[in-house]
Structures are given as C-alpha cells and as structure tokens.
Image: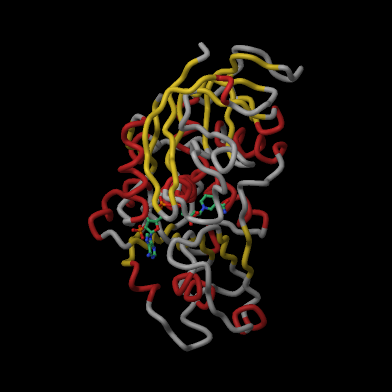
Amino acid sequence: MTEFRAFRVEKEGDTTSHSIVEQSVSDLPEGDLLIKVQYSSVNYKDAMSAKGVPGVTRQYPHTPGIDAAGVIIESTDAAFEAGDEVIVIGFDLGMNTPGGYGEIIRVPAAWATPLPTSMTTRDSMIIGTAGFTAALCVEKLEQMGAAPEDGPVVVSGASGGVGSVAVALLAQSGYDVIASSGKADKMDYLKSLGATSVIGREELATENSRPLLSTNYAHGIDTVGGEILSNIVKSLRYGGSVAICGLVASPNFTTTVLPFILRGVNILGIDSVELPIVSKNQIWNRLATGWKISSLDAMTVEIGLEGISDAVDAIFAGQVSGRTLVVH
Ligand code: NDP
C-alpha cells in the first residue's frame, strides 16, 4: 500500500481550506516506523492546526492529527517489527509532522508506545491526547498526596475531551467530583460519567476581586484558564492542588500570593507533548489496567475524514462534548 488518503489543510494569508487528497508514502518524512493508522481523534490543538491558529503548525499544506494508533507496516528500529500495534501521541505529530488524519504516517521509533495488551487501538484513540492529559492531571494530583478523603475535586470545561475523561477517572478512583460546565443540557451526561454534582460555568467565571474565597474544593483540574482558574485557586482548601493544562477561556489568570502563603495551595503544570516516552508508556499502561475507563463509549462520537472539518468548527464554537474518534 503506497497510496493513501489524508485530510489536508491549505492556508492562504489568514484563510484555511480543507480537502481530502490522495498521497503517496514517498510524500512522508524520513522515520523509523511506517504505520497504517486505524484511528485518530479530534483535539483542541488539531482545531488550532486546521484553522491556521499561530503557534501550532508553521508550514502548510499540512495534515493535522496529534493522535494516531495503528499497525506497523515497516520498521527499521530493532525495538519494533511489522505487525506491532502502537500508539503515537505528542512530540511533533500533527504539528509540523504529517499526523493521524492521514491513513499512513512515518515517525521516529522514539515517539511510539507499544499498545498495552489489554487495550485496543480504538480505545486508545477515544482516550487520545485529551484523555491521556486528564490522566496526567490525576497522577500529578496523586503525587502531591491528593486522596478521595480530602474532599471534592472540581473539573472545569468538564464536558470537553480532557474534562470528560478527568471526571470519569476521578469518579472511578473514588473522588467526589464537581463538574463545572457551560452546557446546561450535559448535566445527565456528566453525572453518567460519575460527577457527584454539576455547577454552571458562570459560577466560577465571574470576576471576584477578593483574594480568597470560600474553600469549596480540596483539589481541581482546570482545562480552561482565565477567571475560572483564578477562582479555583482562591477556593482551594488548605494544602490543595490544581493541575492546569488548558487555555480555552484564556491563557491568562490573576492571583495574589495569598492562596499560596496562607493556604499552602499548589499549581501543577501539565504537558503531554514533550513528556518522555518512558513516562508516556507508564501512563498508557496504567490506563490499560488499574485506570481502565468503563465509560469510553458513552463519551464517543465517531467520524471519518469527511467529518473532521465540521468537528474542528464545533470545537471553536465550544459545542463539543466528550471525545471525537476519527476512524480510517
Ligand atoms: P474541548 O474543546 O474538547 O473542551 C473544552 C471545553 O471547555 C468545552 O467543551 C467547554 O466545556 C469549555 N469551554 C469552551 N469554551 C469555553 C470558554 N469560552 N470559557 C470557558 N470554558 C469553555 O478541548 P479539550 O478538552 O480537548 O482541551 C481542553 C484544553 O486543554 C485546551 O486548551 C487544550 O489545548 C488543552 N490541552 C492541553 C494539553 C497539555 O498537554 N497541556 C493536552 C491536551 C489538551 P463546558 O461546556 O463543559 O464548560
């Protein structure tokens, strides 16, 4: 198989256009592993790449897709052989290296995780970068000593990709989860994932000049930044932590030093992209075993390459809930 289909983005000035094109393996960059991609997914960063938002993709035409899972066709690396199933997320995949919206990719072996035996390639891409990032957030909270008996954990942007997996993973791990969502019609969905209660986005999004607020939350996972993050920091209990990974509302937030020096709270930074492959492999193995998520199908919408353009529009319109799986 040397010809394959890819979702391609062109950019002229500030305008992007999308099409599905035929490509050849010879169009792909050098790399150790040639992979037949079975599944990819739609993440916030894919929407940024597909819409030409600066900071993700420098050169167009381009094939986005920061997630890919499939079967190795050819390997020049001794650690892998043809027929092996692998997951590739992060590093440069889908940013400036042709990504998972092509039916075939070629990448360095150092980017590939062997698919854990108790996980399917489909489930790995329902989780995708978004769900993997949610798992990183939970792991970092745990490393700071968080435990279910500490009290409620708030999750912002809860109906989104990171948020949905964070809610499910925390609930499965025994935490009392407070889901913050802008979608009034997603209350039942969030409760089905395990949220104990759902609060409206405006409850945390309102600007408040007080440096400290009532201590409503033991810990938090913030996917949106901005005023919501500011208010979570002010509302953490003594010794509480918030893992922060996203900027959907804003890359900025304001705080005084008071939550840190009077309540000893912690802000934990999360990056899934450059996380070393050994650490990535450990998280994937945890997601395949002790952290196996039972509600993956409940949070999934399936599309083909033809559906990607609408899916990225939905992300920027804030309309997405759960995970969008791209099936090749
Ligand atoms: P989604 O688009 O799936 O979800 C984002 C959610 O944020 C929406 O569903 C909505 O949830 C909420 N939201 C939308 N617009 C606004 C707004 N204006 N103000 C406040 N909340 C809003 O994105 P993902 O979950 O995939 O990604 C979330 C963030 O995490 C992104 O910024 C992404 O770039 C980042 N990210 C970072 C990673 C890292 O390694 N650090 C890796 C993966 C993602 P609701 O309606 O329920 O409030």
Image color mode = secondary structure
Q: Is residue 311 visible?
A: yes
Residue at image coords 34%, 41%: 309
Residue at image coords 68%, 45%: 275
**Quarter of image, res 302:** top left
Is 171 located above or below residue 78 in the figure?
A: below
Q: Position of residue 15 (x, y in %)?
A: 39, 52
Q: Quadrant of ligand 1?
A: bottom left
Q: Nearer the viewer, residue 278 or 213?
A: 278
Is 281 located above or below residue 33 in the figure?
A: below
- As drawn, the residue found furthest toward the left would be 185
Q: Position of residue 3 (x, y in %)?
A: 48, 16
Q: Position of residue 54 (x, y in %)?
A: 52, 56
Residue at image coords 46%, 51%: 52
- As drawn, the residue found furthest toward the bottom would be 210
Q: Is residue 171 visible?
A: no
Q: Is residue 245 left or right of residue 20?
A: right
**Quarter of image, res 35:** top right
Q: Nearer the viewer, residue 287 or 20?
A: 20
Q: Nearer the viewer, residue 311 or 257?
A: 311
Residue at image coords 62%, 46%: 273
Is 29 located above or below residue 3 in the figure?
A: below
**Dividing the image into 4 quarters, which one contains the C terminus?**
top left
Q: Is residue 220 left or right of residue 277?
A: left
Q: Position of residue 101 (x, y in %)?
A: 46, 32
Q: Nearer the viewer, residue 242 or 303?
A: 303
